[in-house]
Amino acid sequence: MDRKILGALVEDATLSYADLGKRVGLSAPAVHERVKRLKRSGVIRRMAALVDPRAVGKTLLAFVHVDTTGWGKTPELMAISEHPEVEEIHSVAGDTCMLLKVRTTDTHALEGLLARLYATPGVVATRSYVALSTYLERPVQADVTEVWPAPQARARSL
Amino acid sequence: MDRKILGALVEDATLSYADLGKRVGLSAPAVHERVKRLKRSGVIRRMAALVDPRAVGKTLLAFVHVDTTGWGKTPELMAISEHPEVEEIHSVAGDTCMLLKVRTTDTHALEGLLARLYATPGVVATRSYVALSTYLERPVQADVTEVWPAPQARARSL
DNA sequence: CATTGTTGCCGAACTTAATTCAGCCAATAT
DNA sequence: ATATTGGCTGAATTAAGTTCGGCAACAATG
């Protein structure tokens, strides 16, 4: 039941509780109660407007591999996350320490960002993959058919 | 002005128009008008609930490089996008055709997905990077300080 | 087996926000 | 100088969010 609500809210967070209720077969207050619980338990992190990157001038998407000298929440990591062009930072197993997803206005701006990354103390080397075109991009789906109970206890308390 | 509204709505799409108005110095109907325009012009693609991946059982995040025999909207591309584990598909310049962002419950499920990808006609070879931990992950920001006018004309009409 | 407590749902009432509309002001163009 | 357009405000209306009491189902307990 919660999965159905989640799936609908991922697609359209502006749905009224009444419409949601009709869709999943519940009354408006019941849906309201469940959504409130999903929010408080952290399953729903927040509601957000999804913005077209090109509409705000972010035409270029690139994935940047970065080697750093340290591990964990290091100063260089903090420095990297300060750049507004950086959307994601993952530490990956394979061949590099960090994998960054970055968006810039153009190749020139990407070069500027790379220069700033290189200049960061602790950053050793980078390698970049520029995206030519994006065929699919969707937020985390809730349509997993999976064994219960879901690990809701893992959700953050904030 | 629209940038301010966008920035606020990316952070919290549940803000009332009155609160938004107070934040940017406009009345509620004025904000309403602007948001409606931003939605219709495609700058705001949609409102969505951001779900904690772990709360819905998606513990593992991986980036998968895929080589395919064809280019563009090929059947193998459609086949790949059918898998619910696949969140993003980009064609990248560098060394492979496609870069996939996928989420699964565990390594076993990832292996199953890779097996299905390998079995897809047109898919030549894959290489995977498993994310150990994610330090930053945020949606497209609207905080670009950039020359005007923004290329709103590029936004989709739907 | 009955009792008591808990959980989750519904319907109605109430409160708040979304939405519409008429009128106004400023900027631009004729 | 004047008409026209676009965007804003404030009030009124409509719709939604939110709270509450009561009920039914289930589980644990005496």
Image: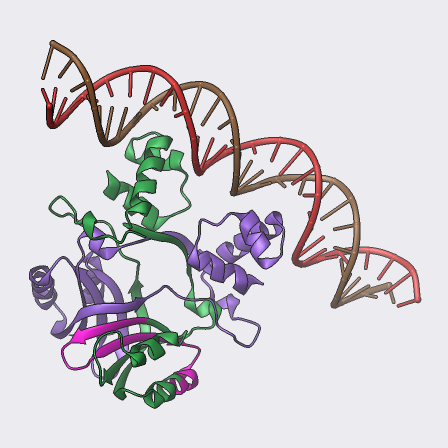
Chain colours: A purple, B green, C red, D brown
Query: What residue is at 39 percent from the left and 83 percent from the top?
Result: B113
In the figure, is residue A129 to the left or right of A42? left
Q: Which residues are magenta?
A: B88-112
- Among the 4 quarters of the image, the one containing residue A95: bottom left
Q: Nearer the viewer, residue D9 or C21?
A: C21
Q: Is residue B79 left or right of residue A76?
A: right
Quarter holding the N terminus of chain B? top left
Find residue A84 and report its image quarter: bottom left
Image height check: is A150 above or below D24? below
**Front residue of this view, candidates D8 and B71:** B71
Q: Nearer the viewer, residue A59 or B17?
A: A59
- Residue A42 in the image: x percent, y percent? 47, 59
Number of marks in picture? 0
In-front residue for pair A83/C17 = C17
For image coordinates 54% across by 50% down, the residue present is: A19
Residue B94 lies in the magenta stretch: yes
Residue A34 rendering spot, x and y as whole percentages: 57, 55
Asked if B115 appears above or below A135 in the picture, the reply is below
Q: Is residue B54 magenta?
A: no
Q: Is residue B105 visible?
A: yes
Say whether residue A49 is visible: no
- Taking A108 as reference, is D27 left or right? right
Q: Residue at x 36, y 36 (%)?
A: B32
Residue A43 sits above or below residue A18 on the image? below
Residue A11 vertical placement versus B87 (above, below):
above
Q: Position of residue B10 (x, y in %)?
A: 32, 50
Residue A51 in picture, x, y percent from top left? 29, 53
Q: Looking at the rendering, which quadrant does residue A69 occupy? A: bottom left
Residue at (48% x, 69% y) in the render: A143
